[in-house]
């Protein structure tokens, strides 16, 4: 999911704001160190507004360095599926951001479940509080799973192969 968001940001200039907004709205961050390093670099370039072709610039950096960015060559090359993902960027961003948030919710769910199971039976208020948190996380996970799924109606609203397909590098 993280790679999908980064790939769309790098190759789909029209969807960069969509990716930024999804990350900000859900208060998400990248969990892999090399993804975080790449994201920091991309944000620095965004602040200076000096780079227009991110993929070409990243290829040049990756070719001449051993930085964490060099581990991300797979994000810089588009195959047929990833080109189509760029064309369906709103759906992919929605699904990827929901997937990342779902992973965080699952971690919180396990943590709250552990706290609930370890809580003392002498304190029913504390047990009720943890049970409420477990229940809320479980419902949020179910909502995020629905958000991750793409329906036929969603696909019908997006181009599959179209005039923009060959324009993506």
Image (cartoon, rainbow, N blue to C red):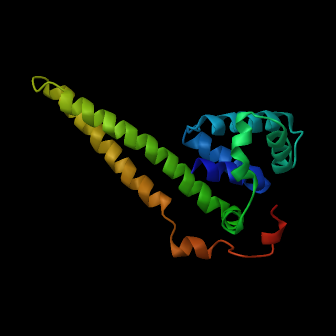
Looking at the picture, tell me which residue is in the foreground, 24 or 35.
Answer: 35
Residue 86 horizontal/vertical position (percent): 70, 61
Residue at image x 82%, y 70%? 166
In the displayed structure, would residue 115 be above or below residue 84?
above
Q: Residue at x 86, y 34 (%)?
A: 48
Vertical relation: 116 (above or below) 145: above
- Asked if one can make out residue 129 in the rendered structure from this viewpoint, the answer is no
Quadrant of image for the C terminus: bottom right
x, y percent for residue 77: 75, 57
152 on left or right of 69: left
| Coordinates of residue 39 in the picture (x, y in percent) | 69, 38
Instruction: Return the residue nearer the eye: 31 or 24.
Output: 31
Q: Is residue 132 visible?
A: yes
Q: Residue furthest right?
A: 50
Q: How many marks?
A: 0
Q: Position of residue 143 (x, y in %)?
A: 40, 54
Residue that appears at 79% across and 41% down: 62
Q: Is residue 5 left or right of residue 45?
A: left
Along the horizontal axis of the image, is 53 left or right of 104? right
Q: Residue at x 19, y 28 (%)?
A: 118
Q: Is residue 89 above or below residue 76?
A: below
């Amino acid at each position: 999911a993280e790679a999908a968001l980064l790939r769309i940001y790098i190759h789909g200039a029209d969807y960069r704001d969509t990716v930024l907004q999804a990350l900000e709205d859900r208060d998400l961050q990248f969990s892999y160190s090399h993804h975080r390093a790449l994201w920091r670099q991309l944000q620095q370039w965004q602040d200076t507004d000096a780079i227009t072709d991110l993929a070409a610039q990243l290829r040049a950096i990756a070719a001449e360095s051993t930085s964490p960015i060099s581990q991300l060559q797979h994000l810089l090359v588009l195959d047929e599926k990833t080109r189509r993902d760029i064309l369906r960027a709103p759906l992919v961003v929605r699904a990827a951001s929901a997937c990342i948030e779902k992973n965080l919710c699952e971690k919180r769910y396990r943590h709250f479940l552990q706290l609930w199971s370890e809580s003392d039976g002498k304190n029913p208020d504390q047990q009720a509080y943890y049970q409420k948190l477990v229940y809320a996380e479980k419902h949020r996970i179910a909502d995020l799973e629905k958000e991750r799924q793409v329906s036929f109606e969603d696909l019908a609203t997006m181009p599959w192969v179209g005039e923009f397909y060959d324009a993506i590098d």
